[in-house]
Every structure is written in C-alpha cells, then in structure tokens.
Amino acid sequence: MKTWMKKAVGPAVVIALMTPVLTQCGAGLPGGIPGADQIPGAAKCPDMTNADAVGDFDWAANFKVDAAVAGKLKGGVVAAIELKQVSDSIDADLKTGCGGLATDLGAGGDFKTGDEACKAAIKVVGEVRAKLGAKASASLDVEPPKCGAEMSVIADCAAKCDATVTPGSAKVECEPGKLQGECSAQCKGSCEINGSAKCDGDCSGKCDAKMTGHCSGTCDGTCDGKNGKGACAGKCDGKCDGEVSGTCSGSCSGSCKIKAEAECKGTCSGSCTAEMKAPKCTGEVKPPTMSAECKGHCDAKAEAHVTCTPAHVGARVDGGVDAALQMKFKTALEKNLPIIAKIALSMGPRAVKLAGGIQEIVTGVQGTVKAAASDPVLGGQLVACVAAPFKGVGDAMASLQANAKVSVDVKASAEFKAGGSGSASTK
C-alpha cells in the first residue's frame, strides 16, 4: 500500500471495509479466512455444530454483549443444534424402518432420506397389494410405544443454562401417572418385559401358552367358539404362533398391560409404589421456571435423549392369491412397522411440536442478534456465527413435518380391506 494510502486509511476503516468479507466467510470458522479472528476487533466463533462448545462459549466477553443477550444467544443456538440432532435421528430411524420394509418386499435403491425410503415403501406395498388380488385384506393390531424424557437431563440442563436455577434443587414434575422407569415394587399401568415373564394382564407380543384375544398368526384352538387350526379373524382361544393381543396364561414376551398392581420385571409405565429408578416422563413435563430460550434448549436436549419402549405390531393378511407372497408381506410388516410406528405415533408429533416452539424462540433471538453488538465488526461476525444453526431450524422443521406425515402414510397403506382400503387400528 502506498504511503499516502496508509495515512488516509486507518485501522478502523480497514476493519470496517473487511466486515462484509468476514461476515460472508465466517471468520474463525472452519473454511473461513485464516487468521481473520486475529484482526483487532474481530471475535472467534465456537464450533457451531457442537452444542457443548456453544454452551461453554463466553458470548458476552467475545462479542461484547450484556449477560441477558448472551443467555438468549446461548439458549437459542444450542436449541437449534439439538433440534437438528433430533431431526437427524428420526430421519435415520425412518430410513431403517421404511428402507427395510421396501427392501424386504423387493424394492431396490439406496435411500438418501427417511421420506424417500418411506415413499418407496408405500409404492412397493401398493404393488404387493395388487399382486395379492382384490380379495386380499390386511389388518394391523398395534401397541404404540411409550416414549419418555429423562427428567434428570432436564433438571441438569436448567441449572446449567439459567443462572436463576439453583444446581441440585431444580424441580421437574411429570404429569401424574405418566412416569416410566425401573420399579422394584408394584407397578400400576403397563410393563415392558425384558425377555419373557408371567403377565398378570393383557399381553401384546408373544405368548408361550394358551391365550385369549387377537392372534396375528395361526390359532390352534377355538376361533369365536368354533374349533379349528388356522387363521382366526376374530377372538382366538388357544395357542397362537404369532403376535398376540389379549390374556396370556403363560409367559409374555413384549408389553403387558397390568390390570392390578403387580410386580414389573422390566420397564414400568404408569406409577410405582416405590421410587422409580432412572425416571422418565411419558406425558407433559413441567420443568423449573426459566427463560424461554433455556426452556427451548432443555426441551430439545431432553428430546434428544428420549427412549421408547418398542411398538408391537401384529399383522394378519388373508385372501391373497399367492400364499408365499402373503406370508412374506406379513413378515415384512411385523419386522419393520414397529420402528415406523414409533415415529408415526409418538416421536414424530412430539418433535414437530418441539420444532414449532424452537422456531419461535430463534425468531426472537435473531432480532436480538441484529441489535446486540455495539461494534459493527462484532455485529457482522455475530450474525455470521449464528446463521447456519438458525437456518437449520427451518430445515429441521421441514424434515420433521415430512417424516411425521409419511410415517403415518406408510402405516395406513399397510392395512386394507378386500376390494377397498382402511386404516390401522391402535390401542
């Protein structure tokens, strides 16, 4: 630079001229301008794909904003990152479930998204229905999953995110009767049995002895009062070689709806006469009072750690012109629909609701960001830092909405009446 230019253009002007470049390239981010974060007045962004890095980052010191603004930034950005993780997890589940169903029924291809895999599954299910003929019918008996959020995750998150919440004393409440966990005493509700155990109630799964109720396989006994061995369209009273939904006189491998208080050697969903171990909440969670941004962050963090008891699906397919294809269809449905049902009946609607709340929070934080930093360079960099995760909220919302809808569509396509169509039944 010539001498006269050095005198005319001071450091502050140089930095101001560089601001658009820094904003576009994201100084301090991977792929940005090397050493840009060393320019006087410039700040370095944390790893905007890592929720822990964003949570530990000192936004107030680096971008010269007050503590309240820093708290909003941290909560909003972390919520956005964790929402993407929830969206990615649901998409991966659908790629597995729908991809498995499509592949098992003969469809080829490498599915890039859950939505793509599910549309392929719907297409091949339609083709199988056509091959089975107009007299074929299929029905489903579905025991929905019970998905619970870890209450300890919400309590820990609240204490770390909001300074007004005292660590170790954050009280998290769950909708009455909606707890889930290990119960060493008596469980009132349903019990997901690990392995096989006596079920003092209604069994959804496999029964190793005489049962009474719905049988998705061959009923060896009486069907609605008539002796026989074969498919039973009504109530089976005997031995069933498929998925059952009803009383089981022996051991049940699956979910047991306990009629009265009984011991649960598995995961209890309901209430326990003793304190539950590692409690989760399958209903509405009431977290401690905290800022909207922290609540969004903690809701997203909890959703990312949600665990579900398996869905149990019994499929009955009758009247097809090809017995081998009919059995192949039944087997494919019972194998792959449980993970699809998890999204359709629980995780999908939960995540869409979560995304709506986080989208509102991010919209508010974006307005705060624009007016936050007093320095023009820092303001430009702050906008650049949060651009990707905030854009990701819209992308995650679109993905979640598409996946929630298509999972329901797959489930609905799998049940049909002879000469017509129907929808799957759930309990």
Image (tube, rainbow, N blue to C red):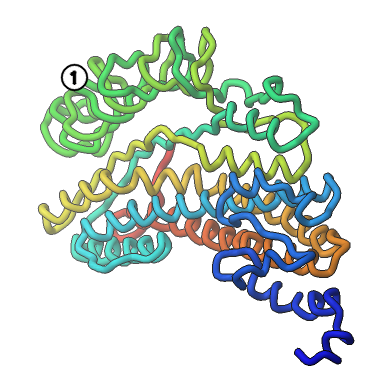
Quadrant housing the C terminus: top left
Closer to the camera in the image, 190 or 150: 150
Q: Quadrant of residue 296?
A: top right
* 281 or 364, nearer to the observer: 364
Please tell me how crowded label 1 is: few (under 14), some (14-19), or many (20+) other residues with Cα within 10 Å.
Answer: some
Q: Residue 128 at what x, y percent from top left?
A: 23, 62
Indicate left or right for 144 with 284 as reference: left
Q: Position of residue 404 (x, y in %)?
A: 50, 54
Q: Position of residue 60 (x, y in %)?
A: 79, 49
216 lies above or below 18: above
In screen coordinates, is 111 left or right of 30? left
The amino acid at mark 1 is Ala
Query: What quarter of the picture does the N terminus occupy?
Result: bottom right
Residue 220 sits in quarter: top left
Q: Please give the residue where the numbered disc 1 appears in the rendered image.
A: 209
Q: Looking at the image, which is closer to me, 37 or 347?
A: 37
Residue 229 appears left or right of 246: left
Question: Which SS class for mark 1?
Answer: loop
Q: Residue at x 28, y 50 (%)?
A: 138
The residue sitting at 29% across, 30% down in the picture is: 205
